[in-house]
Image (cartoon, rainbow, N blue to C red):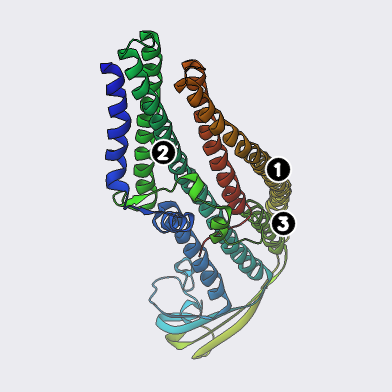
Amino acid sequence: MIAVLAGVMLICILPALNFAAGSSARELDVAEVLRAAEAISPDLKAAMQQEAQARQAIGIIQSEYYPTLDLEGTQSYGFPGSNGALGVRGLAGSPFRDGPGGDAVTQLSLFDLGRHARFKTAQAQLIAAQERTKIIRFEVYLAALQIYFDGVRFRGQQEAWKDIGSDVARVAGVVDKLVKNGQHSVAEHLLVADQTHEAAMLEAAYAERYGIALRRLELFTGIPETGVACPPPQAVSEAGLSAIQPGEASPLIVTAEAQAALAHTAISERTAENYPVLLGLASVGDVNQAHLLSKQDYSGGFAVTMPLFKGFRIQDEIHQAQALAAERDQGLVSSKLSVAELNARYDETIAASRAEIEYLKVARGDAEEALKQTWRRYLTYVGPLVEVREAIRNLGRIKSQAIDIKTDLLLALSSKAVLNGGYVK
């Protein structure tokens, strides 16, 4: 008798304590969770800094299209024209200079296909960095969805076993009276006690899991667990997932495409090293004296360099870049296959879950009617208690199964959406 009463008290008191504080809690939706996870993610912030680096790399390459301007000054001693290692150009670097000299020097690359190729590579690196950010966002979304729907699942299970516990408590109250009056055996009392403890145990276990899910959600999104709640599965509709905007393509595919494009630009960059480079240089200044020639206050000229042989370095770098491009092309094919397989898996879960939900709707109606009939038979001394216990157990199984399947459906729908480029504004 004491054991049954204790079980009934657990069923009645613990849910009240768990939900009294959370009854006015604000229920989170999918869009809010994903926005918060995206805003707080350190991985996403790091990826954005990588984008900034790639953007600045373009500016660095663009600077090669502008002329340079330097002020130079030098003084040399001893044998004239032997100080070229100092790197001074123009008038100040002339071998005919004698004594101190200074000038302003400007240099411009007039023709350089390698510069154009480096610029294209920098642009491709920026696109690859931007697409890499989408991959990070996709991973953040998937993790946030998993945690959120864990909370949805556990709250639904907690409430389901609370309801089952209420049914068992109602039966236990009647059985206790009948046993006390000597109309039924103590064995029936013990059997109901066992079922009472089972319902209380499962409700308490799912309550703990639900609380941990809320704490994990706080860590991942920064949303304080106090004052918020995850809705039960039956409160989340498929239409509620429409906050995830459809994307154009999977981030797994567009990132692989960007990496392949980057590898192909690297081939052009290596190949451009075989082409000539045309440079122009001019300087204006003054030197103390001049050897052999009359002193001038300016100089200018053009130069063409054409690589002929560099120990096969350029050819080997081209072949290396071609091999990398071929690897990235195969990586793109692999990414497309992986996305297709993941979509097929999600489609399988979605289709199976929807079919199972329809069958479980009918099964639940039958289980509820069976519980009414067996309870009526028991109260009129026509049917045994075991029928009631089995009816309650069957109803509990169906409720629990329906919660898991509905949660799996919602998780598959939302995960498929973000896999194919879905995002929240």
Task: Tell me the quadrant of the picture where the N terminus can be found.
Answer: top left
Viewer-nearest of discs 2 and 1: 2
Residue that badge 3 annotates: 309
Is 295 drawn above or below residue 86 in the view shown?
below
Any part of residue 300 in sight: yes
What residue type is disc 3 on? Phe
Left or right position of 128 against 307: left
Viewer-nearest of discs 3 and 2: 2
What residue type is disc 2 on? Glu
Picture coordinates of residue 289, whole percent (x, y): 43, 86
What residue type is disc 1 on? Ala
Residue 344's label in the rendered image is 1
Q: Residue at x 35, y 16 (%)?
A: 178
Residue that badge 2 annotates: 159
Is 406 drawn above or below residue 414 in the view shown?
above
Picture coordinates of residue 145, whole percent (x, y): 49, 47
